[in-house]
Amino acid sequence: MKKILVIGAGLSSSYLIKYLLANAKKENWEITIADQSIELAKQKIGKAKNATALAFNITNETERKAAIKNTDLVVSLLPPTLHILAAKECIAYKKHLVTASYVSDEMKSLDEAAKKADVLFLNEIGLDPGIDHLSAMEMIHKIEDKKGEIISFKSFCGGLIAPEFDNNPWNYKFTWNPRNVVLAGQATAKYLENGLLKFIPPNRIFSQTETVNVVNYGAFESYANRDSLGYIEPYGLQNAKTVLRGTLRKKGFSQSWNLLVKLGLTDDSYTLTNNKNLTYRSLVTSFISGANEKNVEEKFCQFFDLSKNSKDFKRIKWLGLFENKTIELNNATPAQILQQLLQQKWSLENSDLDMIVMKHEIEYSINNKKHKANSTLIVKGEDKTYTAMSKTVGLPMAIATKLILQNKIKARGVVIPITQEFYQPILHELAKNGIQFIVE
Amino acid sequence: MKKILVIGAGLSSSYLIKYLLANAKKENWEITIADQSIELAKQKIGKAKNATALAFNITNETERKAAIKNTDLVVSLLPPTLHILAAKECIAYKKHLVTASYVSDEMKSLDEAAKKADVLFLNEIGLDPGIDHLSAMEMIHKIEDKKGEIISFKSFCGGLIAPEFDNNPWNYKFTWNPRNVVLAGQATAKYLENGLLKFIPPNRIFSQTETVNVVNYGAFESYANRDSLGYIEPYGLQNAKTVLRGTLRKKGFSQSWNLLVKLGLTDDSYTLTNNKNLTYRSLVTSFISGANEKNVEEKFCQFFDLSKNSKDFKRIKWLGLFENKTIELNNATPAQILQQLLQQKWSLENSDLDMIVMKHEIEYSINNKKHKANSTLIVKGEDKTYTAMSKTVGLPMAIATKLILQNKIKARGVVIPITQEFYQPILHELAKNGIQFIVE
């Protein structure tokens, strides 16, 4: 009998918990679902056996110690900054830990202690980071096995609306954390291009996109992620001339989004005070010199050199930014106001399904002959609970959990899943669950 | 006999100390010049009598208490964040305090205690803030005395190179803190325009300039300051439709500076690591996708849609940004690298004189008839020590000090100089010292 403690029963846990419950009997697991809301935990368990709901607050030391002492492995779905609380108890009580978050400096500093305790702290085992590591490393190792040398590595990922439900001019709906979407691109992006270090400052991130074609799904575009350089060392790409990671949107999105950036609506650094009677129309007027509430559409088009028939203008207008509607937020930043509006406009309807698109584009040479390897993943959601995002984040965590408890993983310490012992079995089982890359 | 303690004997103190020393005998003052470097303090005193140099560290409590206890008035030329250390002792020992800095929240919180101690904490009595307050309030009160109603208030100020010594394509040299110049415009500017609140986000500050003509000195341009709205209440401009404050440069500067902003060279949020062999040319190359060290000039022009004969391109080139010269800074931000380069290119030569330009443009109505009032100040430096900046910052502080010690100022508490008891005598004496506004 092995015990698993899952901390967090929110939206992203749906698929993870479903998998764990489905395998509990066969694997002889006893599962505890811990959440601040015991109702939420109970709901996720439903009528399943081998599972208990636990009312739990990670910041309560007594609760934390008791729960972690009494398990074999902790799966933490906590906000990234709180993982460390669980991690320290996992050192003390010698328990494995699984998270889908980036390795923080604090987490990294526990590497030696985790090795000493003979436990594995597996991080970055969700979608992005997660499935990107697994699939990229499988491709990279295959090329290296053929004595290929990688020249260019590009990797793109986006959480989008499935095309069957794509019914707005932005071709986008929120399928994940809206705040992250609104605040994207606010730091300089760094990548490698033809052997040269390249930077894109925030004011140009959404105007320097590249086209990414996806078989059967048409043209997407990618804007550069903050740090592509950090992947060079773990992926062994020291000889590559180009290393770029980007976020996918449907073609045209970024150019229109850039208008919101230029306007100033993604600014999160100051709050608008006394804005009880502020409307979206007056807010936009505030950002255009010379505009007043009568002529704001004309001034907007003049300012950005747009026609009223342009897709860009239609997208902005569709959001309701020119409407005389009161903004129901006080003392909020422009970014918070924009987010609240977008959450109304870009929300998933009940029947909507989301879609994950991931694509790796690799160029390599063997004996000076150039080759290409492309690999694409498309995953669609099953319903509003079992979304593509929840599936692609939760399943890798769940499968890794199983492998660890089966003693099939030898790694110890603070680890990300870039070695064969992770990608081979996990990609294999993901494929059986419909998460399969198409190799072009 | 009255005692004055001047804390700080750096560049900006030259004119202040000169004035205090010149008036010491007549006013029966005993002056202490305190600085971490007693040599600097001694140098400023020269052969003058009635003055003593003091080796002094504001963070040393014993030194601080002893010096402040033993004076009647403290003039603090400390960095703005350190004024508060002097201010708290001034409360304890009931001494007046004079600074040229903006009133911080911490300083503001001492208002009641200062009133209770029956002392004056006079802040914002330099150039900008300082002379701007004095001259604007005199104009505003004159208009109000005529029953005029102010419709529009615009105020501009710039520290520049005098035209006789203006010999570079930017028409600019550093005459004050270079770091502030490099980091200018990185927060959203807020102002009032035709009755509407207006914002300019950082990405547009240097492209939304307005022309300011100065008699005999030609066309300047102004980019908006961070907060023009904060002047509405103290200046009594609640009925004005337009309130704007801006920073002056010679025409064309901002458009070229904007290229540096767009390129990413004013970014102070991350450091470039391992850049021992980085050259200015390779740094610029890093900021342009598709550029390499052979074609960077062409790609730069393509990227910004410029001709190589344009003034903009010539200004960038003149800075040496395309030169294969090693950058002598490691682990520095782009902004720090840019600043170091500009300090070489925009430095004052020994014979160079600086120039202050300040202009207020007011529109007002009397009985529905519109009127204009313009007022312009030009001050040129005398030499490298007695610069226009040192004169216009130091003299108002020095004159205010005299008035306070003569018991001619009734105000108590934490105050800025916006009332007649300040502007009338101080502007009068400034005029006698060559700091005189020209009314158009």
Image (cartoon, coloured by chain):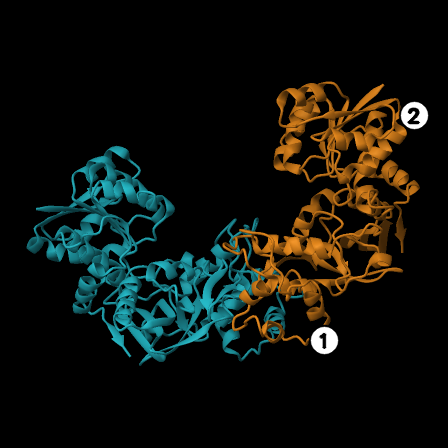
Chain colours: A orange, B cyan
| Subunit that carries the residue with mark 1 | A
- Determine the image quadrant of residue A399: top right
Name the quarter where the C terminus of chain A is drawn.
bottom right
Q: Nearer the viewer, residue B394 or B208?
A: B208
B331 lies above or below B116? below
| Subunit that carries the residue with mark 2 | A
- Determine the image quadrant of residue A78: top right
Task: Identify the amino acid type marked 2.
Answer: Lys
The kind of secondary structure element at disc 2 is helix
Image position, residue B234 (x, y; %): 34, 58
The kind of secondary structure element at disc 1 is loop
Task: Identify the amino acid type marked 1.
Answer: Asn
Q: Earlier in the sequence, mark 2 or mark 1?
A: 2
Name the quarter where the N terminus of chain A is drawn.
top right
- Side of A15 where B178 appears, left or right: left
A69 lies above or below A57? above
- Side of A353 where B43 appears, left or right: left
- The answer to whether tags 2 and 1 share a subunit is yes
Residue labelled with disc 2:
A26
Q: What crowding class fits label 2: few (fewer than 14 Cα within 10 Å), some (14-19), or many (20 or more)?
A: few
Closer mark to the observer between disc 2 and disc 1: 1
Residue labelled with disc 1:
A309
Q: Nearer the viewer, residue A113 or A225?
A: A225
> Residue at 69% of width from left, 19% of height from top?
A66
- Side of A202 where B385 appears, left or right: left
- Residue A190 in view: no
A55 lies above or below A275? above
Q: CA distance from mark 2 to mark 1?
A: 60 Å
> Residue at 87% of width from left, 48% of height from top?
A146
Image position, residue A168 (x, y; %): 78, 62
Image position, residue B376 (x, y; %): 30, 73
